[in-house]
Amino acid sequence: MSVVTPERSSDEMKIQTKTREFRLATIGLFFISAVPFAELYCTQGVLPQIAEGLGVSAGDSQLTVLVTTSGLAVGMIPASLLSERRGRRNMMLVSAVLAVLVGAFMPFCGTFTELLVLEGLQGFLLAGIPAVAMAYVSEEFDSNAIMPATGVYVAGGAASGLVGRVLPTWVAAETGSWRWALGAMTALMIVCAALSIALLPHSRSFVPSAVSYAKEARMFLSHLADPRLIVVFLLVFCLMGAYVSVYNSLPFHMESPPFDMSPKVYAAFFFVNLVGVFSSRLAGSMVAKAGVRRTLLVAVAVMFAGVLLLFPPAVGAIVLGTILITGGGFAGHTCLTGLIAKLVDKGRAQAATLYMASFYGGSAVTGLIGSRVFASHHWEGLVVYVGVLMVLGFALVLTVREKAKSESP
């Protein structure tokens, strides 16, 4: 698995802050992070057009998002293991190029099944980027440069996640076609992949290592047997499932009476995702003062308040509701990411991989259920479903432990 191994090279060989190499490398990180986060949700804003164009229901159209996230979740562990032999940079760049090539065929799909197959394959290929990006940063950047570089990577993901939702929605509004929308995304991702290839420095600190699959399997199983970690994995299931379920169904709800919004107008809802940037930083400060459990309780309470605001058929209430759900969801994700590091003494890379698999797998599984609920019980039923997820999340937070086994009395 991907582990930080400072002994592989001297600090002099690593990328230093305030240098031209650092600036170019972080620009490369920004663009490589754009590929998975933009591609992952690029169909979210054009789901109504896909449903109409390919003759499927609103619930079925949401599978385009859920299949992609499922593929990514499945690909996390294989990509991480393969990078131990082939290198982090190689893994990321090959993943980006292959995923973009798959995306180039999507606008030409003749059936919904063909589109789903390509979405799932693309998700699996995209896993090679988030699975090893932080290992690449840890190995190639000086200790003082790791946090700034990580910040750029996260910022790239946040910005591209927004672009990946808004750009296709606007293109579909102008052209009336989801095919042109996905084609525009592919063109943009080709540029991002090319810039990543040109700017990401070759690995100088990476040393290929033989992977003991039996040892890796034992480590994964030991984490899955730890009830403290199971709580964390289930929590991220609930939080991300609520978040994705709302955003997947939102375009259909806003296109329907009494709102009758055009895609160009409801695309503005996706700008709410920027709230997550600020709530993540706020959550980090709260954890330092109040602890993880209390901060998580606040995050879930904020999300639940947002769910209640989704009931009234008023644009202002729905906007505020999505703001609270987004802010609380990202705050909870920040808490849980840090909690993983606190709970695990050995095999942190494996634990982090399982967490990310739960993050994407949770959004896929609970999002799939949400799509079925929306198809059969409409918006009101979906809101109740998301509320149930929040109640489960609240119950799980009460069982959260903030200390590793070795620190427990």
Image: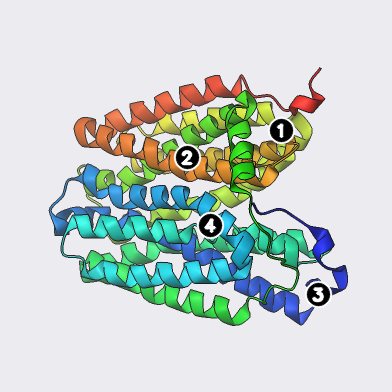
Residue at mark 3:
18
Seen from the viewer's position, the closer of residues 107 and 93 is 93
Label 3, label 1: how many angstroms apart (C-alpha)?
34 Å
Residue at mark 1:
343
Q: Nearer the viewer, mark 3 or mark 1?
A: 1
* Residue 351 drawn at (x, y percent): 63, 41
Residue at mark 2:
240
Secondary element under disc 3, as helix, strand or loop, is loop
Q: Residue at 64% of width from left, 26% of height from top? A: 228
- Disc on the earlier residue, 3 or 1: 3
Of the residues shown, which amino acid type is indicated by label 2? Answer: Met
Of the residues shown, which amino acid type is indicated by label 4? Answer: Ala
User: Mark 3 packing: few (<14 Cα in 10 Å), some, or many (20+)?
Assistant: few
Residue at mark 4:
79
- Disc on the earlier residue, 4 or 3: 3
Extreme top residue here? 409
